[in-house]
């Protein structure tokens, strides 16, 4: 049996636009973020989804709700899909973090798997809950849509590829983009590439110099 899981990063927020670390903070999506959700909803309407699950944070739940309204499906929430907690860094731009925690930020850029933001969450803790979600979801029917955050999707990509968490910051996931995961014969894999004509909707996994 094959299960398909679509991971959708929430629509754009003002904090995305201004380059602020969001984490567990709860900014809402912008009108552009809502438009991103509607665009994905039109694509997903052709794919016979059976369920939609979302992070309970506003930006993810609002994105999921737009898709759900178009598809006529309910939205459930799962705490394992919330963004990595950035603690005291949340709401700050990188230049502000550099002023207050210059050495910690340098280490975060070089070896994020060895750093925990003050009051935040470690990547290993994030990995454990992402792994748990993937394992539980793979056991059920599909296709399923999970609306979540960049950190969760980055971690899922590394988990499936068998790559170290040290590469966390090198995975780029755009707002309103889909990452497709297949579960078949007991094995998780990433889709080989975007479906024809939909390349701007699907994530392109590549190096990203961004902050969050």
Image (cartoon, helix red, strand yellow):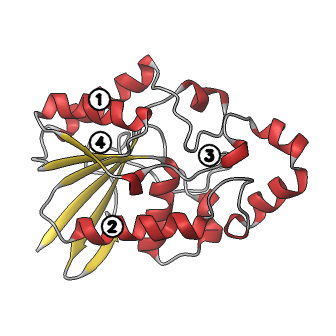
Q: Mark 3 or mark 2, which is nearer the start of the sequence? A: 2
Residue 166 horizontal/vertical position (percent): 65, 70
| Label ID, residue 134 | 2
Mark 4, residues whose alpha carbon is within 10 Å: few (<14), some, or many (≥20)?
A: few
Q: Mark 1 or mark 4, which is nearer the start of the sequence? A: 1
Helix, strand or loop under label 4: loop
Q: Mark 3 or mark 1, which is nearer the start of the sequence? A: 1
Cβ atoms under marks 1 and 3 closer than 8 Å: no
Q: Nearer the viewer, mark 4 or mark 1?
A: 1
- The answer for how far apart the CA atoms under marks 4 and 1 are is 11 Å
The residue that disc 3 covers is: 212
The residue that disc 4 covers is: 198
Q: Nearer the viewer, mark 1 or mark 2?
A: 2
Cβ atoms under marks 1 and 2 closer than 8 Å: no
- The answer for how far apart the CA atoms under marks 1 and 3 are is 23 Å
Q: Nearer the viewer, mark 2 or mark 3?
A: 2
> Where 198 sits versus 103, above or below?
above
Cβ atoms under marks 4 and 1 closer than 8 Å: no
């Amino acid at each position: 049996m094959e299960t398909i899981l679509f991971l959708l990063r929430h629509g754009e927020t003002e904090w995305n636009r201004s380059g602020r670390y969001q984490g567990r903070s709860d900014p809402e999506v912008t009108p552009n973020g809502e438009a991103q959700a509607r665009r994905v909803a039109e694509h997903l309407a052709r794919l016979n989804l059976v369920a939609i699950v979302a992070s309970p944070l506003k930006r993810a739940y609002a994105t999921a709700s737009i898709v759900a309204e178009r598809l006529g499906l309910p939205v459930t929430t799962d705490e394992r899909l919330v963004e990595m907690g950035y603690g005291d860094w949340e709401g700050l731009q990188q230049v502000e973090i550099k002023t207050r925690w210059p050495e910690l930020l340098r280490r975060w850029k070089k070896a994020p798997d060895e750093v925990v933001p003050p009051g935040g969450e470690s990547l290993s803790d994030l990995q454990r809950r992402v792994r748990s979600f993937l394992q539980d979801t793979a056991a059920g029917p599909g296709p399923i849509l999970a609306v979540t955050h960049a950190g969760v999707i980055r971690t899922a990509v590394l988990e499936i590829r068998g790559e170290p968490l040290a590469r966390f910051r090198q995975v780029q996931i755009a707002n309103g983009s889909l990452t497709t995961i297949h579960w078949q014969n007991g094995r998780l894999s990433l889709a080989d590439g975007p479906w024809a004509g939909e390349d701007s909707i699907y994530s392109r996994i590549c190096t990203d110099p961004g902050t969050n």
